[in-house]
Amino acid sequence: MTDVLHVQTRAYPLHYTAVDRTVDRVVVPGRGELRPVPGTLGSVAYNSEETVEVDLTAMVRAAISLPDLTIVACRIRILAAGAVLLTYALRHANDLRKLDAHELATMDASVNRQLREADRALLRDVLAGARQSGLFAHVVVPPGGASADDWTEVHPRAVRYNCHFIARDPVWEPDRRVPGLVLGAHCRILLPYTYAWDDDPAPERIDEILTMLEPADIAVAQQSVLVGASVGGLQILTELARAAPGRLEGPEFRRFLDGVWADYHRLDAYRVESGQDHRATYIAARETIGLDGTHERAEKLLAHVNASLLAESSLRSERLDGRLNRVAAALTVVASAAFLLDIAAFLLPEVGNGTKMVTVSGVILLAAGMLAATILWSRERDARENESPDRGPAGNP
């Protein structure tokens, strides 16, 4: 094995209302048990940021085997701010020092694809088990998709990750397009989402290594929160464009957005809570991955989704009002027919049964005709109102 430790940290946006740090046992059906332990973000200098950490190393090694690659450690860190960080520490049989920055990124992307395909079912089971055990409560998912009770996994497009290479005296040079930014100690940004760290790569130092990587990983967690919200918004827009009936409620979407922005800005507090060196690396990582631009685009998209949901809600209210008006008109016709029968019974008390049958039949036919005319007229009016304004008299574009 080479003297380079390859670390991948994936960020899963998972909006929940609380994390229970007292849970000490998570059962994963068919796979065993996990023991969560309370932790903190070690790079936060001013106010302690609590986490829950779960060691997945044994479970992952039993489920995943890749050629020329050794899984040194695998750990989940559940943040208080609606994001879950999954970290793999890997060793390669090949000498990574012989690769340049672009070859490193290509190799890392290939490994990431293989790991994500191999651990998809495992992570789904682990997250579901953590939720069932009460480790995190009240998962909030975007409206229009599965309900929280049916939630099983994070949308794969919402997942973002960093790759880190830890070695003594790293030889890799950054890509020339990476801006020259002030960084904390030991860090070098090779490409967006790709970092080299000058430090001891000994696997037994995994706790110190994860603390060192926190600035870049917090930035990618924020990116995943924004991308996840945008993915949910696009799903809603697709359903609205297709006029597909679904769980599309404006207030529900508003609650989801409140959770998204609360989690995003809680993570953003890292810029003032972290130590000086960590803060410099965090700000540089934000700029390199374009986090502020993602924030602006997500805000515009979600504002448009909110406006579309309000318009859809108004349209559904109008349609409901139309149906209620038809029901009210039908009830009025029926009441009028009943009143006519009462009048006929009062004015013609002594007539024969034949006359009564004719009178009753006539009133019923009249009421039925008026009821049918009322309903048809109401439906035709609704159809005209719902017709697109850019269509011609024949209903063609």
Image (cartoon, rainbow, N blue to C red):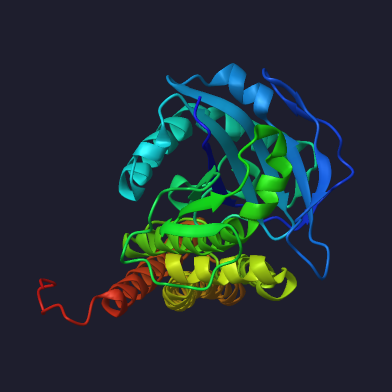
Residue 91 lies, in percent from the top left, at 52, 29
Residue located at (42% from left, 19% from top): 67
Q: Residue furthest bottom?
A: 389
On screen, 17 above or below 4? below
361 left or right of 276 in image? left
Residue located at (55% from left, 68% from top): 183
Q: Residue furthest front?
A: 169
Residue 334 lies, in percent from the top left, at 52, 69
Residue 259 lies, in percent from the top left, at 65, 66
258 left or right of 293 in image? right
Judging depth in this view, the residue of 295 and 115 nearest the camera is: 115
User: Is residue 257 visible to us here?
Assistant: no
Judging depth in this view, the residue of 325 and 372 nearest the camera is: 325
Judging depth in this view, the residue of 239 and 55 nearest the camera is: 55
On screen, 33 above or below 370? above
Residue located at (26% from left, 77% from top): 384
On screen, 191 above or below 57? below
User: Is residue 393 visible to us here?
Assistant: yes
Question: For residue 110, what is the image quadrant?
Answer: top left
Residue 336 lies, in percent from the top left, at 53, 75
Q: For the image shown, how many numbered marks are present on the structure?
A: 0
Q: Could you tell me which quadrant the C terminus lies in? A: bottom left
